[in-house]
Image (cartoon, rainbow, N blue to C red):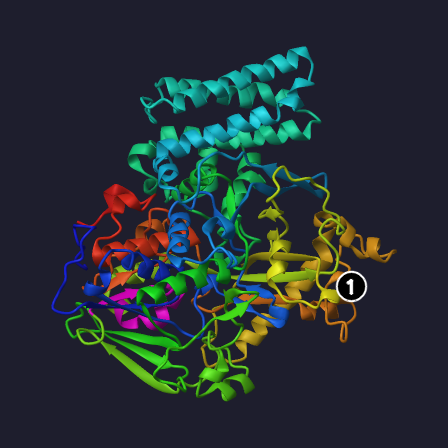
Amino acid sequence: MPTVNPDASVLSPSVRPRKVAILGGGISALTTAFELTSQPGWEQSLDITLYQMGWRLGGKCATARGEHMRIEEHGIHGFLGSYYNALPVMRRCYEALGRTPDQPLATFDEAFKPESFVLMWEYIDGKMSRWPFTSPRNALVPGDPASLAKLQSVAHWVAATADVLDALLDHHAHAYADLGLVKSAQWALGRTLVKGVVALLKSESVALHGVESALWKALDAAWNWVRDTAETLVKDNTELRRLLIVAEFLLAILRGCIRDEVATKGFDPLDEENFSDWLIRHGASVMVASSPMALNTVNLSYQYPQGDTARTALMGAGCYLHWTLRSFAYAGAFAWLFEAGTGETVIAPLYEVLRKRGVKFEFFHKVESLKLSADQSQVQEVHFAVQATLKDQQRPYEPLIAVKGLPAWPGQPRYAQLEQGDALRDGRVDLESYWSGWQPVAHRTLRAGQDFDQLVFAISIGAVPYLCRELLDASPQWRTMVDKVTTVQTQTMQLWMNRSTTELGWDIEFQNPTDTVIGATYLNPLDGQVDFTHLLQWEDWPQDSAPKALWYFSGAMAEYEAPPPFTDTGYPARAHARVQAQCVQYLQASMGPLLPLATTNVVSPPGDPMGLDFSLLRTNPAHPGVGVQRFNQQFWRANIDPTESYVTSPPGSTKARLKAWGSGFANLTLAGDWIYTGLNVGSVEGAVMGGRLASFAVSGYPALADIVGYPASQGPV
C-alpha cells in the first residue's frame, strides 16, 4: 500500500521531486493532477506527467468538433446539483483559469447554468404519457464552501429529501384545494403530518434510527396516510396520483434510512440487495418501485445487465440510496448544465490550468501493459505503443483549436504537427480505437525509480483485463474486482433539426428561464433525451441553413457476445452500423409522444403518426438525401472501446472495489469511478472523487474529510 502523507497541508521535499506518472486522460486523471498541483509548492516535491492515448483528453467526456464545428459528444453530460466534489473542483478550476471578462465563459457562473425540469414518462392506457416534474430551487450555491458545509451529512440529505416533498405538496396545493370540503380536510391532515416529519428532521437532536423514536412515529403516521387514506382521494386526478407516487417513494426511502440505520452504519451493508427489493422491503408498492420516479437513478447510470434494457435493472441498494438521497439534496438546482460542450466547459479548462501549472502531457501514448517486479511487490515497468511523433521535438503537442474564441478539441489530430499526419489523415485512422489496426511508430518503456516513483492508474476498468494481466495473475483481489465491477457499452445520437423545439410540438411552459427538456425514462434503448439547442451558438453553420434545434439521445447498448480480438478491425464499423440502424428504427417508432409535430402525419399528411419525418433533419442543401437517408448526416456513436464502457453498480460489487491506496502494489495508486469512492456509481462525480482520493493517496491532500460522501471509516489503516 502506498504511504499516505498524514499532513494534508505539507509536501515533504526530497532529494529530487517525486516523479508521478498518471496513466489516462479522463476526468479522474485530470482531477488527480489538479488536486496534486493545488498545494502550495507542489513543484518542489512532485514532477507530474500525464500519458494519454490519441489526441484529446476527457475519456468518456471527450468532445470533438465535426463539420460546421458542430459539437459531437460520447453521450449526454451535465452535473447534478449533488456533485459535491465535481462542482467545487470546477469552480476552483475557473478561478485558476483567470480568463478576462471579455473572453467567452470566463467564470464558473457563466459556464454552468441551473436546470430544474425533468420530463418523466408513464405508460398509461396503452400509450406514453408525459410527466413534467420541476424540482424546487434553493439558496445554496454550487462550489461555495459555506453552502457545501450544509450538504456534507447523511442527516442533511435525509432532511433535504423531506424538504423536497414538503415543497412539492405546497406547490400542488391548488390541486387538492378544489376537492371539496371533506377531501380537502383529509389532504390538510396529510400535509400536517409531512410537515411534522420535516420539522423533526431539521432538529439537530433527532436520531436517524430506532423504530420507537418520535421521528419514526411521525414518519409512520405520514406513511399510513399515504397508503391508507390518500389513495382514495386521487381517482381520475393525474396530478394528485403522481404526487402520491412521489410521496410514497420518498417516504419509503426515509423509512428505509431509519430502519436500516444508514446514518450510523453507512450505505455499504445494503449493497448485497437489489434496489427494487430494498424499496419494496420498506413498503413501496411494485407500482412505485417501477415508476419513473424510482427508475430515474438506474436509467441515468445505465444499470442494466450487459446493457440489455429488456432485462430488469440491477443496482446495489446502498449505491442506489446514496445517489438518490444526494440527488434531492442539491445546491441551488437539481442539475447544472454546461453552456458549451463538455470538452469546452470542463476538459479544456482543466487542461489549460494544469499545463499552466507545469504538468507535462504526453499525447499519442497508448498503454500496452504494466509489468511487475520479480517479487511482485510493485509495478516495475509501463510499456507504451507510441502512436505518432511530433515534427518539432522541442515543442509540446498543441491539441486545442479556437471556435468563436473558445478553446475546443478538434475531431481528429492536428495532423500538421505530426510526422505521420498525412498517413493518419489519408487512412482516416481512429487513434482512440483499440481496433484501429494502426501500428505503433515506436515503443516506450517507463521504469520504476527512473521514470516514475509513483504510478496513478486512471484508465477505465474495462481496459484492465487487457493492460494489467500480470497484476490479475498476481492478485485475487484484482480478479474479483474485474469480475464483480461490471461495465456496459452505450450508444448516443444527436439530431440537428430545421424547426425549433416549439415548432416540433413542445408545449410545456418552464417555470425557470434556464430550464430545458431533460428525460431519462422514455422508450428504450435510448431512454435519455435532452434539448441542447443552446449549444448551437458555439457551432459554425451557414446563416441561411443553420439548425433551429439540437437534441441528444443516449442509452445502454446490449452486448450479445464478447468483443472480438483487436485484430478484427471491422468491428467498429459493424458497431457503428448497428447503432445507426437502431437509431433509425427508434426515430421511426417513438417520436410522436415526445415531439408530436415532428411526425410524417403532421409534416406531410397522410403518414406515420409515430415516426419522425426525416425531412426535419438539417442536412447539406447540396446533397440533402431523401427520407431516412437524411439521418446519415447526423451524429451517432457506439461507445464500444474498453475505456468507454460505463461502470455499473450491481448488487455485490461494492465490496469488490479496490481503494485508491489499496492496489496491493507499493508504487501503484488507483483513480476512477470504478474504485471504492463511497458513492460507487459511474459518473463524473464518482470520477472526481476517485481522482481526489488518488491525490490523497499520493500526497495526503485533500483530507479525506473534505471528500464529501467518502465514509470516514474507510480510510487507510
Residue 175 sits above or below residue 666 on the image: above
Front position in the image: 507 or 461: 507
- The secondary element bearing badge 1 is classed as helix
Label 1 Cα crowd, 10 Å radius (few <14 / some 14-19 / many 20+): many
Which residue lies at the image location 50% right of the left edge and 31% below the top edge?
Answer: 164
Q: Where is residue 13 in the image (x, y as percent from the top left)?
A: 14, 62
Q: In this view, does 662 lie to the left or right of 562?
A: left
Q: Give the image location of residue 666, x and y in percent.
A: 18, 64
Q: In this view, does 173 lie above or below 158?
A: above
The residue identified by callout 1 is: 615
- Which region of the structure is painted magenta? 453-471
Q: Residue at (44%, 88%) from the top-left corner? A: 419
Does the rendering let one see residue 115? yes
User: Going by the picture, which residue comes out furthest to the left?
Assistant: 15
Across and down, in percent, residue 199 comes to: 42, 20
Q: Does the magenta stretch include residue 470?
A: yes
Residue 26 in view of the camera: no
Amino acid of disc 1? Ser
In-image side of 355 versus 623 (left or right): left
Q: Viewed as shown, does residue 441 lie left or right of 238?
A: left
Number of numbered discs: 1
**Relative height, residue 523 to residue 178 (above, below):** below
Given residues 582 and 160, the one toward you in this image is 160
Residue 145: in magenta span: no
The N terminus sits in image quarter = bottom left
Q: Residue at x 25, y 55 (%)?
A: 39
Of residue 110 and residue 474, the one placed in the foreground of this image is 110
Q: Where is residue 648 in the image (x, y as percent from the top left)?
A: 43, 54
